[in-house]
Image: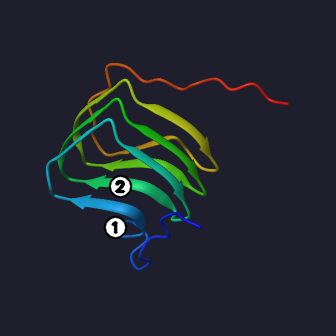
Amino acid sequence: PGGVRGSGGDQRIGSSGITFYQSPIVMERCQILDGYAPTGLQIVNAPLKLIESEFGAASGDLVRLDAAQGSIERCAYHDALGAALVFEQSFECPEELFFPLRAIG
C-alpha cells in the first residue's frame, strides 16, 4: 500500500501530499502518483520549473499552483478525480501541456 495522504489543517496550504511554500523548485523527470490528499503537489508563492514529470492517480487535484511563477514543460497528467492543474492568482501560461489519451474498455 502506498500513496500520500496529506497533513490536513488549513485547506489552502498544507493539505496536499507535497507542499512547497516560498521555496524555489525544479522537478525534472519526477513522478507523483497515488495521492489520497486533496492535492498531490502544491506550490505556493514560489518560482518553479516542472520538466518531463508525471502526475497521476489522485483522489483530488494533481497540481495546484498558488501565486507561483515559472514554466511547465512536457509533463503528463492522468487519472485525477479532481482537476489536472489548478491555477490560483497570476501564473504565466505554460509553454506546452500534455494530457495523454487512454482507451476506455
The label on residue 39 is none
The label on residue 13 is 1
Q: If the image is split into quadrants, where does the C terminus sit?
A: top right
Q: Are marks 2 and 1 in contact (CB under 8 Å)?
A: yes
Q: CA distance from mark 2 to mark 1?
A: 8 Å
The residue type indicated by label 1 comes to Ile
The label on residue 42 is 2
Across and down, in percent, residue 89 comes to 31, 45
Q: Relative to 72, is 44 above or below?
A: below
Q: Earlier in the sequence, mark 2 or mark 1?
A: 1
Residue at the bottom extreme of this rendering:
9
Q: Relative to 39, is 85 above or below?
A: above
Instruction: Classify residue 38 as left or right of residue 50.
Output: right
Secondary element at tag 2 = strand
Q: Relative to 10, is 35 above or below?
A: above
Across and down, in percent, residue 20 comes to 25, 58
